[in-house]
Image (cartoon, helix red, strand yellow):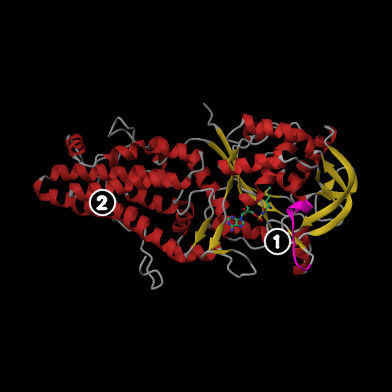
Amino acid sequence: MPATPYYLTTPIYYVNDAPHIGHAYTTLACDVLARFKRLDGYDVKFLTGTDEHGQKVEKSAEKAGVDPQSFADKVSQNFRSLAAFMKFSNDDFIRTTEPRHIQACQAMWTRMLDAGDIYLDNYGGWYAVRDEAFYGEDELTKQPDGTRIAPSGAEVEWVEEPSYFFKLSAWEDKLLAFYDANPDFIAPQSRRNEVTSFVKGGLQDLSISRTTFNWGVPVPGDEDHIFYVWLDALTNYISALGFPDEQGEYAKYWPADLHMVGKDILRFHAVYWPAFLMAAGLEPPKRVFAHGWWTNEGQKISKSLGNVIDPFELVEKYGLDQVRFFLLREIPFGNDGDFSHSAMVGRMNSELANDYGNLAQRVLSMIAKNCDGRVPDPKDKLVLSVDTAPTLGAIIGSRELIGRVRELMDRQAFHDALEAVWEVIREANRYVDQAAPWKLKKEDPEKMDAVLYVLAETIRNVTIVLQPFMPDSCSKILDQLSVPTDKRSFSHLSSVDNLMDENSLVPGTPLPKPEGAFPRFQDDEAGAA
Ligand code: MSP
């Protein structure tokens, strides 16, 4: 049977600026999910890319004194470098200035036009270049100096120009019916309620073309107009599948299983995008998840405050897997979170170094020292040791783990998925303390072998499950258990009812010299952590 396709996407990032923690966060969440689904046997397509048109990019290029294309080329490269640096496993990288994308946009336009959903009129209203969004007067706050700001804090300007409109108002009922029929379309639940009430409040037709500047996709058949950047940008999700060709990748991967976005851009993905698609006679995506925003040591992150977190610096300071772990472990996914040095060091030292690292290190060193550096042989004591172990939960738990974790990952509950793994890790550490294998060396060496085998197997199972989160460190630990690289997917986890099966560690296998995978972070600032 061919593997089930799974298509997930990040937002495409504006090339007006260097990548920061927010960009790294969204893509990281997708990367972990993509790796998870691959290990679970899916045929995954994971897409990211850059959003290169629009007024915001044009203005940034102007400021830098270069033409927008060269500017986009340069900044887009920084996003690719970040992806490589963070070991993101995206299968494609789309740029909105590529011919394949422009072609898809124009085909999308033609379909919406042919369906009668586009008309020409004049636009007069407020526009925020920073958000690339139109706002109604009632959404704005008037400042003492007479200027207005959007709910996002962005300045708006008055725009008047001829414009094509999309008949969004006609899609209100169909969108509500779609949300009703697909209760998992918008997550988390609180966001779903927000979107539903926004749509219930009434939708206005949306301006979808601009005429006062040129940096965009030309509207087919009217050279005075270019695409409104959000119609252009959203289309990336299908242009990367070869649309308008509806065979091939499009047939295989569309509708997308998941669009991962930040909470600030949910409306575009959960309201405009499904309406555009339905108008064009195409299926809406299956799910949009809106995650929260990070602050830095309690403060909103902003360039003017000078507290932007550079993901490159973060990784250099704390380590890649440590940062990957922290970002998904620290807060329930969907909530806002605060990045602080002490929280980072706290997680590194308690959960990575003390709990997981120490478990692996203790067990592997005992095996190196007492079992001749080979996987111990539990013989018939395996059952005995398991039966008599007060904390039998460790091994059994690790074998049941994937079922729980899978269900949580499908809801993008990364934090809970990690908690489920840590329950097993903590349990395994208690088992080490209670079974005290170091004492058994003299008293009952066979039982010691069985206890250490149980623990090594627990580490193998837990580490296979953790690979998507911390690929390098997990690979290092699996190497130390001599697990062959082609035996590291979820189908190689041990089964619940059989403590030793064809996937389990093979007694007698030589193991390399153990090495710590998770060093403690030590500095004065976090000395107490
Ligand atoms: N170009 C649009 C997306 C088009 S998708 C068809 C865009 N780009 S962006 O570069 O401004 O932002 C991309 C993502 O970064 C958003 O999902 C946003 O939520 C996220 N973040 C920006 N700052 C953030 C934090 N401080 N914390 C977490 N995520 C943040 O919007």
Q: Is residue 69 visible?
A: no
Q: Nearer the viewer, mark 2 or mark 1?
A: 1
Q: Where is residue 520 in the image (x, y as percent from the top left)?
A: 36, 63
Amino acid type of the residue tagged 2 in the rendering: Val
- Secondary structure beneath label 1: loop
Which residue is at a point 44% across and 45% down the rendered structure image?
416
Along the line of sight, the residue nearer the viewer: 68 or 164: 164
- The residue range painted magenta reads 133-145
Residue 326 in the magenta stretch? The answer is no
Q: Residue furthest bottom?
A: 524
Q: Can residue 303 be seen in this view?
A: yes
> Which quarter holds ligand 1?
bottom right
Which residue is at a point 76% across and 50% down the rendered structure image?
229
Q: Which residue lies furthest to the left in this view?
A: 443
Residue 135 in the magenta stretch? The answer is yes
First in residue order: circle 2 vs circle 1: 1
Does the residue tagged 2 have its C-beta within 8 Å of any atom of ligand 1?
A: no
Amino acid type of the residue tagged 1 in the rendering: Asn
Is residue 45 left or right of 438 when viewed as pictured? right
Q: Position of residue 323 (x, y in %)?
A: 47, 58
Q: Name the residue under label 1.
A: 16
Is residue 512 left or right of 450 when viewed as pictured? right
Distance of label 2 from label 1 (alpha carbons): 50 Å
Q: Where is residue 91 in the image (x, y as percent from the top left)?
A: 59, 45
Is residue 235 left or right of 112 when viewed as pictured? left
- Secondary structure beneath label 2: helix
Q: How many C-alpha atoms fall within 10 Å of the one at disc 2: few (<14), some, or many (≥20)?
A: many
Location of residue 181 (image quadrant): top right
Does the residue tagged 1 have its C-beta within 8 Å of any atom of ligand 1?
A: yes
Which residue is at a point 9% across and 47% down the rendered structure image?
443
Q: Where is residue 270 in the image (x, y as percent from the top left)?
A: 66, 41
Q: Name the residue under label 2.
A: 363
